[in-house]
Amino acid sequence: MKKPTLHQRLRAKRRSQSLVIGLTWYTEETWAEVKATASDPECFEESFAKWKAMAVSARREFQRSGVRAIECLIAPQEFAAWCALNSQENNATSRAEFVSEKLTAAQGGS
């Protein structure tokens, strides 16, 4: 396999640096509250400390790969209202969709 040229590697790096993702983020209190109302509590780590260690590690890995990872704090009441408005339950899919919508709104998207 042919090795990419310097120009190709730099262009690929610029493309990956333009990627932005939202990371679901919690305080200890909001983590406990969202987990308590989740339909999939088994998807959460067993403690906030373990969740925090995993989240910080994931953020670091994204950043190392050139992806801009932005923490999106979930406010339980705001999230519950969003779920009700969108006929969603509190599960991993809806939490990810909520964070994606918040990130898009914060970035000035529609």
Image: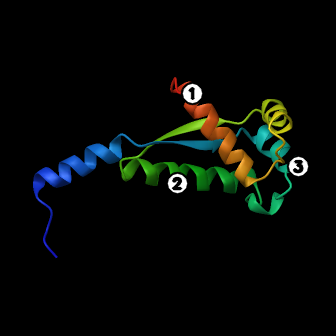
What residue is shown at x 45% (from left), y 51% (from top)? 62
Is the residue under label 1 in contact with that under label 3 (CB below 8 Å)?
A: no
Q: Quarter holding the C terminus? A: top right
Residue 29, how many percent across, how many down? 80, 38
Labels 3 and 1: the sequence-earlier one: 3
Residue bearing the label numbered 3: 36
Q: Nearer the viewer, mark 2 or mark 1?
A: 1
Give the spatial CA distance, label 3 vs label 2. Answer: 24 Å
**Which scheme is used to colour this image of the protein?**
rainbow
Q: Secondary structure at mark 2?
A: helix
Give the spatial CA distance, label 2 vs label 1. Answer: 30 Å
Q: Secondary structure at mark 3?
A: helix
User: Is 3 left or right of 62, judged from the image as shown?
Assistant: left
Foreground pick, 92 / 76: 92
In the displayed orientation, state which residue is furthest to the bottom.
Answer: 1
Labels 3 and 2: the sequence-earlier one: 3
Is the residue under label 2 in contact with that under label 3 (CB below 8 Å)?
A: no
What residue is shown at x 69% (from left), y 39% (from top)? 98
Occupied quadrant, residue 51: bottom right
Residue 96 circle label: none
Q: Is residue 23 above or below residue 58?
A: above
Crowd tier of the residue under label 3, counting other residues whose Cα lies within 10 Å: few below 14, some 14–19, many 20 or above: few
Q: Quarter holding the N terminus? A: bottom left
Residue 46, how many percent across, how many down? 77, 60
Residue bearing the label numbered 1: 110
User: Is 45 left or right of 70, judged from the image as shown?
Assistant: right
Residue 109, how many percent across, how many down? 52, 27
What residue is shown at x 64% (from left), y 39% (from top)? 99
Residue type (three-letter) at the residue carrying disc 2: Ser
Crowd tier of the residue under label 1, counting other residues whose Cα lies within 10 Å: few below 14, some 14–19, many 20 or above: few
Q: Nearer the viewer, mark 3 or mark 1?
A: 1
Residue 57 circle label: 2
